[in-house]
Image (cartoon, rainbow, N blue to C red):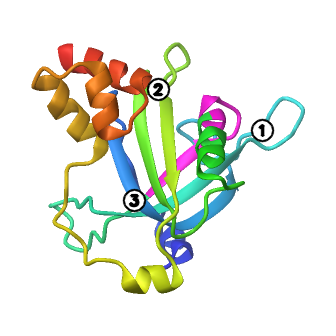
Amino acid sequence: MSALAEALKGGGKYLKWEQPGTTYTGTIADVALRQARKYESTELDFWDDGTPKMQVVLTLDTDYRDPDAEDDDGSRQLTINLWSGQKKALMQACKAAGVSEPQKGMTFTAMHVSGVGNAKSPRVFEYVLAAGPTGVAAALAEPEQPAQPNTGELARQLLAAGADVDTVAKATGLPPTTVAALANAVKA
């Protein structure tokens, strides 16, 4: 089902950010820019000067499935506010990937670093973008290996096993600040 058909049906399934350390990875299937809606409302949101508040909406093809939904194809949506630290995190991920914006076919990882999602404690995210194989490289790619734990889960497992922050950062490729935040979440 296309992103438009999904939106007309009532919207896609969104990623859930229940606690710091939650990490999702998927291949970008669609990139859209849309106006945000007011919190817990269907009304469009605007700044005091009348300028629309905008968000990037990424549709990701993921390996995540809801066992209670027979037709769950793993497609998940992620909204990134363009007025917060989320914008800065997205810009950093684009810069690190050598692109000006997220693009279809790229692998996107989002990690919830801290915060609970309210005005006093907004959620803080780190994003990673990576180009996927295209053209001949995609045709020649090795067959997919069995699913491995996602980076955040691997980091949590290593921390729980007693590995230090630097070792986990090197093993997973995550920034030490992210691993430190995970270490605090594991201890809690």
Local crowd at mark 3 within 10 Å, few (<14), some, or many (≥20)?
A: many
Q: Is residue 72 left or right of residue 123?
A: left
Task: Give percent across and percent down for residue 97.
Answer: 59, 51
Q: Is residue 29 left or right of residue 160?
A: right
Q: Earlier in the sequence, mark 2 or mark 3?
A: 3
Q: Identify the amino acid type marked 2.
A: Gly
Residues drawn in magenta:
77-88
Whether 10 is drawn above or below 183: the answer is below
Residue at 87% x, 38% y is 50
The residue that label 2 is drawn on is: 117
Q: Nearer the viewer, mark 1 or mark 2?
A: 2
Q: Nearer the viewer, mark 2 or mark 3?
A: 3
Task: Give percent across and percent down for residue 22.
Answer: 32, 36
Q: CA distance from mark 1 to mark 2?
A: 20 Å
Whether 26 is drawn above or below 188: the answer is below
SS of the residue at dot 2? loop
